[in-house]
Amino acid sequence: MFWIFAAIAAIAVAVLVWAEWRASPARFAAKPVASLAFIAAAVDRGAFDSTYGRVLITGLILAAFGDLFLLGSTRPAFLAGLVSFLAGHVVYVIAFMTLNIDPLWTLVAVLVVGMAAASVVRWLRPNLSPDMVGPVFAYVAVISLMVIAASGVVADGATPWILVGAIGFFLSDLAVARNQFVIESVTNRVWGLPLYYASQLILAWTVGV
């Protein structure tokens, strides 16, 4: 069943990308379907059979709520989506921390991911209004922590797909940031949306590994 849900998500994402390109209202149907598909995929993989799975699916649900909020075009809708995704990233960190973590490689990841995060902050800072500096910087810090935690658990023997999913999620957020703060373009969605949904499906897959 996992692959059926993955196929449904892929079809919905294809429709979503087309709808974003054509400014079609089909996006209001395609996005919830794609988001529900990665939640269903996690359930199919046995999300409720382990602490890791139960915590992770909570993060997936928060991400799905973020997807719904981002269907809106207003600043309040964006902020609501930002908070939902921020909470989702925090929950992912908690999920990863339920697994064993390698302290040395976690420290290495802090250095590497920290440099990447600093580059993102420098890139975004000139384009942020004063009221968005704090929320955006906090968001960058939390998504960086997610990747760091994923690196630590993978180094200690967890499936590498956890890190693949975490990095994919991190990169897909750059597409959202670029579209919101740097330059609004459908190209941001063309690569960001498939990467985001693929990352959620990968993380959903890991609950059964």
Image (tube, rainbow, N blue to C red):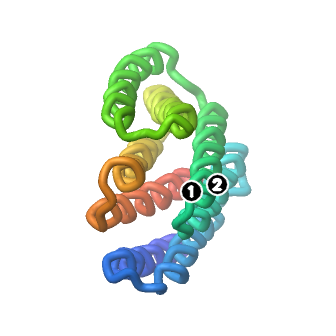
Q: Which sits in the foreground, 45 or 29?
A: 29
Residue 80 numbered tag: 2
Crowdedness of circle 2 by 10 Å Cα count: few (<14), some, many (20+)?
some
Of the numbered discs 2 and 1, the one sitting upstream in the chain is 1
Q: What residue appears at the point 69 percent right and 53 percent down from the top-left corner? A: 58
Whole-number angstrom distance, CA of label 2 to CA of label 1: 9 Å
Residue at (37% x, 75% y) in the render: 20
Farthest residue to the front: give it: 130
Q: Position of residue 89 (x, y in %)?
A: 58, 42
Looking at the rendered image, the quarter that the N terminus falls into is bottom right
Residue 58 shows which numbered tag?
A: none
Residue 90: percent from left, percent from top: 63, 38
Picture quadrant of residue 42 = bottom right
Q: What element carries label 1?
A: helix
Q: In this rendered view, identify the residue nearer to me: 94 or 206.
A: 94
Locate residue 63: give its quadrant. bottom right
Residue 14 shows in this picture: yes
Count neighbours of disc 1 (C-alpha within 10 A) and say few if under 14, some if 14 to 19, many if 20 or more: few
Label 2: which secondary element: helix
Kind of residue at badge 1: Arg
